Amino acid sequence: MKRAALSASVALCFCLGASAQEIPPSTEDPATTAAEAPDRSTGLRNQPYFSNIIKTNLSTLALNNYSLTYERLIARKISASLGWRHMPNTHMTQTALTKEVMKYFEEGDSDINEQLDQLKMSGNALTAEVRFYTGRRPGAKGFYAGVYGRYASFTYDYPYDFESELGTTTRVPFKGKSSGIGGGIILGGQFNVHKRVIIDLYIIGGHYGSFSGKVDGLADLSDLSEQDRTDLKDELESLIEIGDRKNITATVREDGVRADVSMPFLGVRGLGFTVGFAF
């Protein structure tokens, strides 16, 4: 819940005139009285605050991702942070989130399930971010807008089954590495739930950049006909389609497949729930 900034209260000087009973005039200087009256706005701005926060994103656990972020105030309401995220080697359809997503394909094409069940990935990501917080209270609290840059790297294993014109199935064990770099913006809110315990809620954000990598699939493809090799090439190059751009360029030879991946590095950050400790 948003913590609204409290408006300043100014001390008022009341002049009391003589009535039926004469009241002695005050000996206090009105200007001095107003100056000595507490200014609530100034009090809020001068509250003590912590300059460091260590936090972890709990929502990414649904994708078997583990994260740690260090945030440091570099001005009264501006912070800089560096975050690291790790995903161990994981069957992508076996995470809590993708299990729910894959339910939508259960009554559809079973080949999609069989192919995706074999995909395993691991990866790391580094995110550098600068945030600008709202509110009169000092420190990394309140609603914020941030700008960030992200570098991510992935490795993957994907045994791909290709069915030839004659109905035979050839397995191509793909192994690849790729990386992406990009930048974006994020909106959210960070609040104290205890003196040192904070929650950070990502509302919406996203980044854009470039992503590239190489994939090798070493296998004996000498039994495939020329048409089969063309079909395998077309299948692989159509796996990732973004607009009209060809994002995978594959070469099929007798000893296997070589492929280059080049595509936009797109990502969305939203509905994230992070818990941290301030010190």
Image (spheres, rainbow, N blue to C red):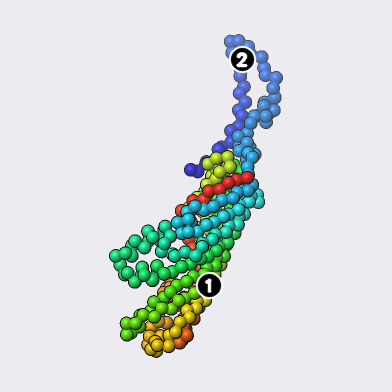
| Residue visible at 51% across and 62% down in the picture | 87
Judged from this view, the residue extending furthest toward the left is 107
Q: Secondary structure at mark 2?
A: loop
Q: Is residue 25 above or below residue 51?
A: above
- The mark nearer the N terminus, 2 or 1, is 2
Q: Position of residue 157 (x, y in %)?
A: 47, 71
Q: Is residue 145 visible?
A: yes
| Observer-nearest of 135 and 68 | 68
Q: Position of residue 41 (x, y in %)?
A: 60, 37
* Residue where numbered disc 1 is placed: 177
Query: Residue 80 falls in which quadrant of the image?
Result: bottom right
| Observer-nearest of 15 and 167 | 167
| Observer-nearest of 92 and 57 | 92
Q: Residues within 10 Å of mark 2 (few under 14, many from 20)?
A: few
Judged from this view, the residue extending furthest toward the top is 21
| Residue visible at 53% across and 48% down in the picture | 275
Q: Position of residue 107 (x, y in %)?
A: 29, 65
* Residue where numbered disc 2 is placed: 18
| Residue visible at 39% across and 80% down in the picture | 170
